[in-house]
Image (cartoon, rainbow, N blue to C red):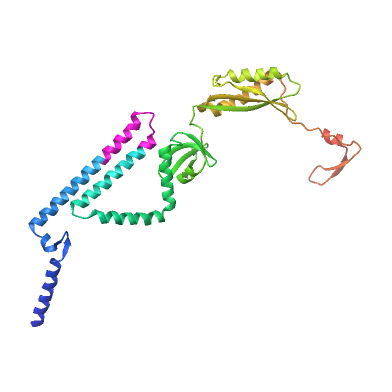
Amino acid sequence: MEQLEQTTSSLWSRITEIFNTDIYNGKSFADLLTLEALVSIATGALAAGLIILVGFAFAGFVRRRVRKLSENHSSLDNTLFSFLGNLARYIILAFTALFVLNTFGIQTTSIVAVIGAAGLAVGLALQGTLSNVAAGVMIILFRPLKVGDFVEIDGILGTVKEITLNYTELADIGNVQVVVPNSDVWGNTIKNYSSYPTRRAEWTFGVGYGVNLADAEKVIRDTIMDDPRSHAEPEPFIQVNNLGGSSVDFLARVWCDSADYFQYQADMKRRVKEALDAADINIPFPTRTLVTDPSASVTVRKDADAKSTDQSPSSIAAE
């Protein structure tokens, strides 16, 4: 009996010790079980819930308003303002979290310090990924390219489909998806064929040495300039540029709209060739003249039966 009383007394002492231990904001568990404490906790929880609802609603509203700016003004870049909208949302949510913690009496100064130290450790571990994020921010802010542009990045030609903080998505000429890390985009030379409204197309056309060069130039100029896609300004350049081994070469440089460039360049090659043929202007092509010694004889294997015959070069040519 005495042992049971001792056990009961020890157990009660442990329970009393637990109830008197400070567990929240300088208050023990026993203090928290009072009606006043429960009301205080419930009030804090309701306030925190209200702050969270207001914070999320306000963050969403700000993000939509920022994105709406680019939709209402065509001169503003959608990608940039989408990024700014998301950034504003995350900042508001971060402040919302701090307000919620303060509502429960939690000191946020030490938490911010811990988050800062953890952020440094994570940054060192994810250095490659963060370099992509940093490059993505630079791309979005300085906008060397935007969605819809036709670009060349590190030898890859394609149309920009999406720009995120981590990668840039292209659709190449064969409509194959190409995902390029932003660090590679920002760290390489970017050729943006859509930045300017016009481009200069260039061709080289060769004619024979016996051709009247003035007539040939007129045919080339008239054929190109009759196309409505050709720009009269800046002034086209169509002149003899080179005396080749078998042809006199004309260099033609004419401006056109960037959107027409590829088809325009291909069309003019065919039309100029057809125009030169119609004008009976010789377009030379490499030829080879074989001079042989008629007195020499060669052995030619004619079939799979390994039969050999001695023939003269003239009979070989006839065959």
In the image shown, does 155 or 314 lie closer to the viewer? 155
At horizontal 85% and vertical 44% (from top left) the residue drawn is 308
The one nearer the camera, 136 or 26, is 26
Q: Is residue 150 magenta?
A: no
Say left or right for 190 vs 5: right
Which corner quadrant holds the C terminus?
A: top right
Q: Residue at x 13, y 66 (%)?
A: 19
Asked whether residue 78 is drawn in magenta, I would say yes
Quadrant in which residue 117 is drawn: bottom left
Estimate the x, y position of residue 254 in percent, counting from the top left: 58, 24
Nearer to us in this view, 78 or 117? 117
Percent position of residue 101, x then y = 22, 52
Position of residue 217 relative to residue 134, above or below, is above
- Specify whether residue 166 is in view: no
The span shown in magenta is 59-81
**Above or below: residue 185 compared with residue 200:** below
Q: Nearer the viewer, residue 265 or 313?
A: 265
Magenta stretch secondary structure, dominant: helix
Q: Where is 130 relative to 175, above or below?
A: below
